[in-house]
Amino acid sequence: MGPRLSAFTTDDFSNLISSPMITKSMKKLWMSWSSGKDSAFALAELLKDKEIEVTGLFTTVNEAYGRVAMHSTRLELLKRQAEELGLPLELILLPAKCTHELYEDRMRTLIAKAKAEGVEAMGFGDLYLQDVRDYREAQLAASGIQAIFPLWNKPTNELAGEIIAAGFRAVITCIDPKKLPRSFAGRLFDEKAILDFPGDVDPCGENGEFHSFVFDSPNFKNLISISIGEVVEREGFFFADVYPSI
């Protein structure tokens, strides 16, 4: 007869399940950060996920202008957002006239760096454009990094209201004049703006009708004080120049 086993107590079980040997590690994630409202709200959702550890942001920047692509956010404001979030920022610098091949090459470099740093997932603020999602997933497929879309298929009329109600404050920085009047450039993204949108404009601008800059967020340490400068037309779009207040 073998040795007698001691009784397995409740305390023993509690110690076992809390043991580091079986604790599930959090999945490291980098967030695709556009500087606008959708990526800010998507990040907030990911920060609430107890299985995810957000360890960084990455953003494409037009190196000729020193601004975020399409959103036209100044580099100094982009860096300020990262500081207020307390997250490191990876910049993907692109020339003004960027070929698809060059873009993909720069993204491969970023993905390789993320993989080397133990990143297992990347978060995106895309809402419902399936071709965009398919492209992002294909970009990451070979690396084994998972693409996560926390806002996917949320009704945008409800989502726009959620973003505002949650305390995110944003200004519209870019508009497509084929979809919106020039006067929307530089306006706050708020309930009044949404009511004033033409009926065929997505409330979150998912079809490229407009882009935004978030200057206040529940996840920021401090509000970013901004001023709105001139509105300029460039390459078929109107951009409001947003700069830090002194």
Image (cartoon, rainbow, N blue to C red):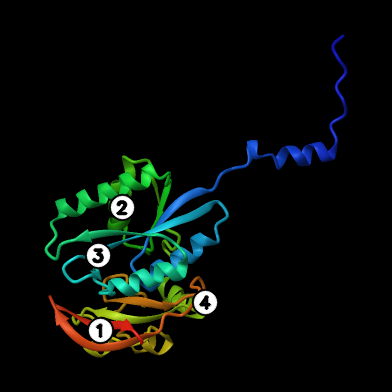
- Residue matched to label 3: 61
- Residue matched to label 4: 166
Q: Is residue 4 left or right of residue 95?
A: right
Q: CA distance from mark 2 to mark 1?
A: 29 Å
- Residue matched to label 2: 136
- Image quadrant where one finds the C terminus: bottom left
Query: What element does badge 2 sit on?
Result: helix
Residue 156: which quarter of the image? bottom left
Vertical order, 181 against 66 (above or below) = below
Q: CA distance from mark 1 to mark 3?
A: 17 Å
Q: CA distance from mark 2 to mark 3?
A: 18 Å
- Image quadrant where one finds the N terminus: top right
Q: Amino acid at mark 2?
A: Arg
- Residue matched to label 1: 240
Residue with the most extreme top position: 1
Q: Residue, x 33% and y 43% (percent of image)? A: 141
Mark 2 in CB contact with mark 3 (< 8 angstroms): no
- Of the numbered discs 4 and 2, the one sitting upstream in the chain is 2
Q: Residue, x 43% and y 46% (percent of image)? A: 120
Instruction: Please name which of the two marks, 1 or 3, marks the residue nearer to the observer.
Output: 3
Query: What element does badge 4 sit on?
Result: loop
- Of the numbered discs 4 and 3, the one sitting upstream in the chain is 3
Instruction: Please name which of the two marks, 2 or 3, marks the residue nearer to the observer.
Output: 3
Q: Amino acid at mark 1?
A: Ala
